[in-house]
C-alpha cells in the first residue's frame, strides 16, 4: 500500500472509475489516500507519505471526534487505523 496526501479538488474526475479499476483509491480523514495506483497519484499531484506520516494526518483530522449517540461506542474517541 502507498499513502498519499492531497486535498480533494471537488471536481468530477478526481478519482475516476478507471482509476479504481486499476487499483482502488480509498480516502480517509485529513485528505489521506491509500492506493497502489501511482498513476492516479501522479495525475492529481498527490504527495507520497509514510504510513506513520499518513496516520498522524488522520489522527489530527479526527482529534476530539466521538462516536454518536446510539453507537455501541457512544462518547468514545473515534479511532481510524490505516491498513
Image (tube, rainbow, N blue to C red):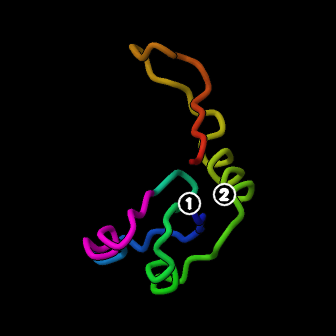
Query: What separation in Å lies between label 1 and label 2 (alpha carbons)?
Result: 6 Å
* Near-viewer residue (67 or 44): 44
**SS class, disc 2:** helix
Res 13 quadrant in image:
bottom left
Residue 36's x, y, as percent?
Answer: 50, 69
Q: Earlier in the sequence, mark 1 or mark 2?
A: 1
Residue 19's x, y, as percent?
Answer: 34, 74
- Residue under the point 59% across and 68% down: 4
Q: Which residues are magenta?
A: 16-26
* Dots 1, 2 in contact, CB < 8 A: yes
Judge from the rendering whether residue 83 lies leftward or rightward of residue 11; answer left or right: right
Judge from the rendering whether residue 43 lies leftward or rightward of residue 53; answer left or right: left
Residue 28's x, y, as percent?
Answer: 50, 52
**SS class, disc 1:** strand
- Residue under the point 35% across and 73% down: 22
Image quarter of the N terminus: bottom right
* Near-viewer residue (48 or 59): 48
Res 45 quadrant in image:
bottom right
* Near-viewer residue (82 or 79): 82
**According to the image, label 2 marks what residue?**
54
Please check the rendered image and state whether residue 23 is part of the magenta-colored stretch, yes or no: yes
Instruction: Give residue 32's mark.
Output: 1
Seen in the picture, residue 41 relative to 83 is either above or below; the reply is below
Judge from the rendering whether residue 53 lies leftward or rightward of residue 44; answer left or right: right
Seen in the picture, residue 20 relative to 56 is either above or below; the reply is below
- Residue under the point 60% across and 33% down: 79
Query: Dot 1, crowdedness within 10 Å: few (<14), some or many (≥20)?
Result: many
Residue 74's x, y, as percent?
Answer: 50, 15
- Residue under the point 67% across and 50% down: 55
Amino acid at each position: 500500500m502507498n499513502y498519499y496526501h492531497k486535498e480533494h479538488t471537488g471536481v468530477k474526475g478526481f478519482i475516476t472509475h478507471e482509476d479504481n479499476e486499476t487499483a482502488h483509491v480509498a480516502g480517509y480523514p485529513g485528505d489521506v489516500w491509500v492506493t497502489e495506483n501511482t498513476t492516479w497519484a501522479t495525475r492529481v499531484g498527490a504527495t507520497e507519505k509514510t504510513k506513520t506520516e499518513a496516520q498522524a494526518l488522520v489522527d489530527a483530522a479526527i482529534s476530539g471526534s466521538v462516536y454518536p449517540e446510539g453507537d455501541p461506542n457512544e462518547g468514545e474517541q473515534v479511532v481510524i487505523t490505516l491498513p
